[in-house]
């Protein structure tokens, strides 16, 4: 039976973080605003209103292009993409077509067979449309989103499975958030996807006929729509049929695609250079400046965490998932210094700290347990002033109250009892009070050892240094 290979290419739209819209001075931060309050003659397409290019949006596009290892075009042109839709007041969308801002890059993803580069065909700048709201049988239009800067990233048809698609989207989103180009907030529609998919006989070099699935607003929808479409195409091909090149929509509730348009009524967008805007010539020095403004990218950072801190790949991945987490960890390791190895510090962060951060619903960037404060706590553990259990409790209090570790330890008398003389007295007393248990232990019931340790820990409310307690007990019981 013929085996089929899945071929997928993605088009991702990401809203860029800028103060104002793409071609006017309306605020681009419209989320939650009353409908049609972020509008002006330009983004409402009043006759005679003229667009002006938002430099920050161009800068963000270049930064994204650089982060995707693209070639940054020096000559860029905006063009009109003509189509009509109620949420597109001008009757065309200003986009880049022949001369996009960034071309030919790649994004590295993880696969079971190791890292893989997914080619980036182009990343260009355009403007978002407005939004239709369908309510009680009528349709309303909100132009707040019309003209918000939108970055479109088109991949090569390089993905071979739904897992690779998911990984690509996750890494792309992570990257855009890292460099501050987009919020990546899927719930607010800051990232929207279109998936192109075809099948071909395994081993074939030719591309099969693709379909495009539009309007996918979550990674889950992308996965579900692709799974549905791959199964459908395989059925058609197996029964000797042909795939038609169509544009599909996705009905999430019903879990199926539907045909939006066939090849015959494919749009001819009649692109032509936007006469109201100048061509852009991008200064090389500016590109260099933008390159210098990029933070260490997640992939490089993960590699550094492995090399510099000796973390395994998985932990390094978790600790670099978000820039704020990675910043926190870098700062923490440097504050702790030689006192604890980074691997141990990583366990504290991924265990106790993440639990507290998640429970609080706050970002790690604005918790009261700063890296310096946390480091002071970890040094108390390293110096054996407190044991790990106590430290967990102290961290909890610190998180709640913002207090320093040392103040809590002193106030609550939590310092570990490492005074061998005091502990020896306690052990002697315990053994003299429990002659039966001692006798049974000496008769071979060695499981009782844990019980003796437990008694001392209870008496000291967990503060006894367990190693010293064990040693003292051993000496005496086996004497
Ligand atoms: P269109 O002209 O229909 O927009 P493009 O060639 O511009 O098509 O490609 C759009 C997207 O579709 C890109 O992400 C590309 O990688 C992907 N793509 C192109 N051909 C195929 C194919 N045969 N199978 C899967 N994806 C494809
Ligand atoms: Mg397309
Ligand atoms: Zn406006």
Image (cartoon, rainbow, N blue to C red):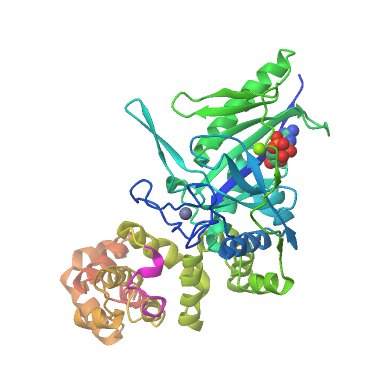
Residue 238 x/y as whole percent: 72, 16
Q: Relative to 43, is 87 above or below?
A: above
Residue drawn at the location 31% of the way across and 61% of the way down = 443
Q: Relative to 287, is 27 above or below?
A: above
Q: Residue furthest front?
A: 48
Magenta residue span: 363-373
Tell me if residue 7 can be seen. no
In terms of depth relative to the viewer, which is nearer, 467 or 71? 71
Residue 325 x/y as whole percent: 47, 66
Q: Is residue 120 left or right of residue 409?
A: right
Q: Relative to 129, is 200 above or below?
A: above
Residue 11 image-quadrant placement: top right
> Is residue 153 highlighted in magenta?
no
Q: Is residue 146 left or right of residue 172?
A: left
Tell me if residue 477 can be seen. yes
In terms of depth relative to the viewer, which is nearer, 460 or 429? 460
In terms of depth relative to the viewer, which is nearer, 152 or 426? 152
Residue drawn at the location 70% of the way across and 42% of the way down = 271
Residue 458 x/y as whole percent: 21, 68
Q: Residue furthest top?
A: 239
| Image region (quadrant) for ligand 2 | top right
Residue 426 x/y as whole percent: 21, 78
Residue 181 image-quadrant placement: bottom right
């Amino acid at each position: 039976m013929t085996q089929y290979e899945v071929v997928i290419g993605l088009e991702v739209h990401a809203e860029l973080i800028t103060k104002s819209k793409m071609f006017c001075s309306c605020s681009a931060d419209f989320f939650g605003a009353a409908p049609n309050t972020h509008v002006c003659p330009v983004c409402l397409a009043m006759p005679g209103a003229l667009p002006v290019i938002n430099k920050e949006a161009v800068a963000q596009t270049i930064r994204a292009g650089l982060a995707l290892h693209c070639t940054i075009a020096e000559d860029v042109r905006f063009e009109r993409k003509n189509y009509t839709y109620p949420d597109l007041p001008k009757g065309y969308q200003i986009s880049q077509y022949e001369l996009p801002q960034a071309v030919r890059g790649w994004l590295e993803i993880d696969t079971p067979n190791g890292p893989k580069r997914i080619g980036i065909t182009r990343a260009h700048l355009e403007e978002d449309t407005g939004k239709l709201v369908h309510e009680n049988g009528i349709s309303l239009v909100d132009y707040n989103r019309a003209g918000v800067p939108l970055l479109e990233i088109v991949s090569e048809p390089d993905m071979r499975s739904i897992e690779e698609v998911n990984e690509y989207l996750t890494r792309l989103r992570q990257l855009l958030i890292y460099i501050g180009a987009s919020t990546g907030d899927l719930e607010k529609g800051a990232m929207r996807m279109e998936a192109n998919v075809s099948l071909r006989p395994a081993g074939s070099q030719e591309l099969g006929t693709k379909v495009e699935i539009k309007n996918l607003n979550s990674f889950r929808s992308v996965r579900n729509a692709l799974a549905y479409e791959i199964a459908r195409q395989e059925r058609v091909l197996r029964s000797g049929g042909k795939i038609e090149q169509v544009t599909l929509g996705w009905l999430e509730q019903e879990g199926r695609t539907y045909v939006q348009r066939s090849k015959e009524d494919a749009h001819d967008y009649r692109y032509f250079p936007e006469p109201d805007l100048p061509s852009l010539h991008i200064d090389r020095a500016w590109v260099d400046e933008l390159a210098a403004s990029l933070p260490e990218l997640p992939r490089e950072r993960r590699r550094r965490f492995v090399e510099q801190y000796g973390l395994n790949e998985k932990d390094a991945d978790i600790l670099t998932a978000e820039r704020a987490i990675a910043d926190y960890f870098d700062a923490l390791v440097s504050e702790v210094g030689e006192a604890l190895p980074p691997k141990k510090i990583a366990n504290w962060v991924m265990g106790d700290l993440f639990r507290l951060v998640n429970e609080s619903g706050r970002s790690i960037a604005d918790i009261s347990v700063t890296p310096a404060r946390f480091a002071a706590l970890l040094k108390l553990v390293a110096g054996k002033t407190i044991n790990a259990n106590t430290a967990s409790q102290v961290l909890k209090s610190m998180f709640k109250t913002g207090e320093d570790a040392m103040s809590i330890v002193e106030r609550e008398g939590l310092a570990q009892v490492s005074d061998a003389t005091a502990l020896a007295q306690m052990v002697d007393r315990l053994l003299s009070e429990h002659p039966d248990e001692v006798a049974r232990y000496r008769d071979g019931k060695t499981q009782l050892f844990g019980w003796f340790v437990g008694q001392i820990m209870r008496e000291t409310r967990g503060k006894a240094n367990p190693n010293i307690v064990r040693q003292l007990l051993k000496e005496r019981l086996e004497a």
